[in-house]
Amino acid sequence: MIREQKAKIAELLSGVVEELGKDEIESLIEIPPEQEMGDFAFPCFKLAKTMRTAPPRIAEMMTCEYS
């Protein structure tokens, strides 16, 4: 079930994160260490260099896209 959810999230993020393929996006999606942090997490640090943007700004862009 988690695999399917990660695949759905990767599909959505692939429209925003053009620098990575769906498989790579899916491999980066993780479960946070504390449940209060949410069900899934995506580390934006890997994108910071290629997008030349700070990780918090990348996260904000993703959030705005799906709010």
Image: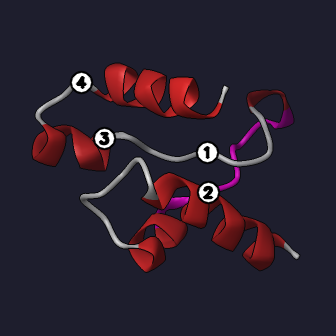
Disc 1 vs disc 2: Cβ atoms closer than 8 Å? yes
Residue 20, picture quadrant:
bottom left
The spot of residue 13 in percent (x, y) is 51, 53
**Residue position for label 3:** 45
- Position of the C terminus, as image quadrant, is top right
Task: Give whichever of 49, 34 is nearer the camera.
Answer: 49
- Residue located 44% across and 55% down the image: 15
Of callouts 4 and 1, which one flags the residue occurring earlier in the amino acid sequence? 1
Magenta stretch: give its range.
28-35
Name the amino acid type tagged 2: Glu
Q: Vertical placement of 28 versus 55: above or below?
A: below
Please give left or right for residue 67 compared with residue 11 in the image.
right
Please give left or right for residue 4 compared with residue 52 in the image.
right
Of callouts 2 and 3, which one flags the residue occurring earlier in the amino acid sequence? 2
Alpha carbons under labels 4 and 1: distance apart = 17 Å
Disc 4 vs disc 1: Cβ atoms closer than 8 Å? no
The spot of residue 53 in percent (x, y) is 19, 28
Name the amino acid type tagged 1: Ala
Camera-side mark, 4 or 2:
4
What secondary structure is the magenta-colored segment mainly?
A: loop
Q: Vertical placement of 1 versus 35: above or below?
A: below
Task: Give whichever of 16, 51 is nearer the camera.
Answer: 16
**Residue position for label 2:** 30
Alpha carbons under labels 4 and 2: distance apart = 20 Å
Q: Is residue 32 magenta?
A: yes
Q: Is residue 30 magenta?
A: yes
Name the amino acid type tagged 4: Ala
Please give left or right for residue 46 compared with residue 17 in the image.
left
Tag shown at residue 41: 1
